[in-house]
Amino acid sequence: ETGVTQTPRHLVMGMTNKKSLKCEQHLGHNAMYWYKQSAKKPLELMFVYNFKEQTENNSVPSRFSPECPNSSHLFLHLHTLQPEDSALYLCASSLGDTLNYGYTFGSGTRLTVV
Amino acid sequence: ELKVEQNPLFLSMQEGKNYTIYCNYSTTSDRLYWYRQDPGKSLESLFVLLSNGAVKQEGRLMASLDTKARLSTLHITAAVHDLSATYFCAVDSNFGNEKLTFGTGTRLTIIP
């Protein structure tokens, strides 16, 4: 257990479904991130939140909608996804602009869109 | 735009041998990070290098950073099967935007 908890660990959803991924950390970090990891592709940064304000949206399609109600919780709301969205979605947290310790990653959610 | 390149992308090596993974990056930075990922798992932090000339060692792994050459190396000594994994380097762009850019990863397979 890294201190960053992601749920669910696995998710299978149809293209018309709506689901949400949850990430929680109690490390005292103030920045949180969503990354997408697809087979044979580099880690893709999706969103960055710092002190619960979104500071980066890396041209992510609107079918992915992030929410950060406080510095400890981060959600990724999913709707009308495509099969190519199937991937491992990783949440991470950090101390923000110091980054002296890098990121702490959660265990990830393996998403399959059918 | 910051680019981070690793080589090789794939590496098979025999147990007991030594090898080095290279991480090059395109813009000025003095903070670099190494992570390990086992298949189907998340990323685990290995090393944090925060200055030019920094060297860190843990067991059979040693990482170093040369900020002038924009190069970091991850050296494996006397490899064992347990080191089989994918290794990523990541660079802080120094723009104060709390964001790391990751390399493509090196998949390391240790053969008995």
Image (cartoon, rainbow, N blue to C red):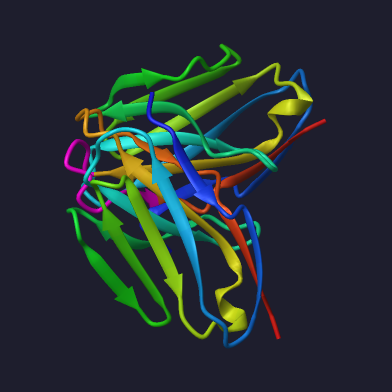
Taking the spot 36% from the left edge, 20% from the top edge, the residue there is A56
Looking at this view, name the residue that lies furthest to the top: A62
Asked whether B40 or B97 is in front, the reply is: B97
Would you say A51 lies left or right of A111 here? left
For the C terminus of chain B, which image quadrant?
Answer: bottom right
Position of residue A32 measured from the top left corner of the image (x, y, whole percent): 34, 36
Residue B99's quadrant in the figure? top left
Taking the spot 25% from the left edge, 28% from the top edge, the residue there is B97
Taking the spot 20% from the left edge, 60% from the top edge, the residue there is B53
From the image, give the main secondary structure of the stretch colored magenta: loop
Q: Is the residue B37 above or below the residue B109 in the image?
A: above
Asked whether B102 or A5 is in front, the reply is: B102
Q: Is residue A12 magenta?
A: no
Residue A71's quadrant in the figure? top left
For the N terminus of chain B, which image quadrant?
Answer: top left
Taking the spot 22% from the left edge, 34% from the top edge, the residue there is B94
Magenta region: which residues?
A95-104
Asked whether B65 or A61 is in front, the reply is: B65
Position of residue B88 measured from the top left corner of the image (x, y, whole percent): 48, 53
Residue A73's quadrant in the figure? top left
Position of residue B96 measured from the top left corner of the image (x, y, whole percent): 19, 30
Would you say B2 lies left or right of A38 here? left
